[in-house]
Image (cartoon, rainbow, N blue to C red):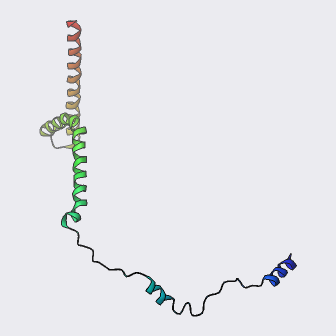
């Protein structure tokens, strides 16, 4: 195998067949710069105030939209609990555990009244039929 390789190298030689012209790299950068077209450099215009503030305005609008959606989705359910909580905090004493227990009792009483109202309404519907 080595004998065959040496025979091939002897026949073809180590020359690749490609040659660089004389003084090619000496004038390379000059020739390259001469062949490129002229480019006019223009200053970029200053962005207007709106272009600079636009991302912040959009972000503020996005957060306002999220806040409005949360008010719509969670606002209807929390209106009743807010009124109950404000009434409880106005009547309840400032000490910790007793105020929490009183708040819980008022909420339970409220739930029981709502339950009783729904039972009474169902009974009235049954008697009307």
Tell me: 83 left or right of 24.
Answer: left
Q: From the viewer's perspective, is residue 97 above or below residue 55?
A: above
Q: How far across and down, in percent of the image, does residue 4 sit?
A: 86, 77
Q: How far across and down, in percent of the image, does residue 70 sit?
A: 25, 43
Residue 106 position by quadrant? top left
Tell me the quarter of the image containing the C terminus. top left
Q: Residue furthest left?
A: 90
Point 21% across, 50% down: residue: 64
Q: How far across and down, in percent of the image, does residue 73 sit?
A: 25, 38
Tell me the quarter of the image containing the N terminus. bottom right
31 or 80, nearer to the observer: 31
Point 82% across, 84% down: residue: 10
Point 44% across, 86% down: residue: 34
Residue 56 position by quadrant? bottom left
48 or 10, nearer to the observer: 10
Q: From the viewer's perspective, is residue 1 above or below residue 65?
A: below
Q: How far across and down, in percent of the image, does residue 46 sit?
A: 23, 72
């Amino acid at each position: 195998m080595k004998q065959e390789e040496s025979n091939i190298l002897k026949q073809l030689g180590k020359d690749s067949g490609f040659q660089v012209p004389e003084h090619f790299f000496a004038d390379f950068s000059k020739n390259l710069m001469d062949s490129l077209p002229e480019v006019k450099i223009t200053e970029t215009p200053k962005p207007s105030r709106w272009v600079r503030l636009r991302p912040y305005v959009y972000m503020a609008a996005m957060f306002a939209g999220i806040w409005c959606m949360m008010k719509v989705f969670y606002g209807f359910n929390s209106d009743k609990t807010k009124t109950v909580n404000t009434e409880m905090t106005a009547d309840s004493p400032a000490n910790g555990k007793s105020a929490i227990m009183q708040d819980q009792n008022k909420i339970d009483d409220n739930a029981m009244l709502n339950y009783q109202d729904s039972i009474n309404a169902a009974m009235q519907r049954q008697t009307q039929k």
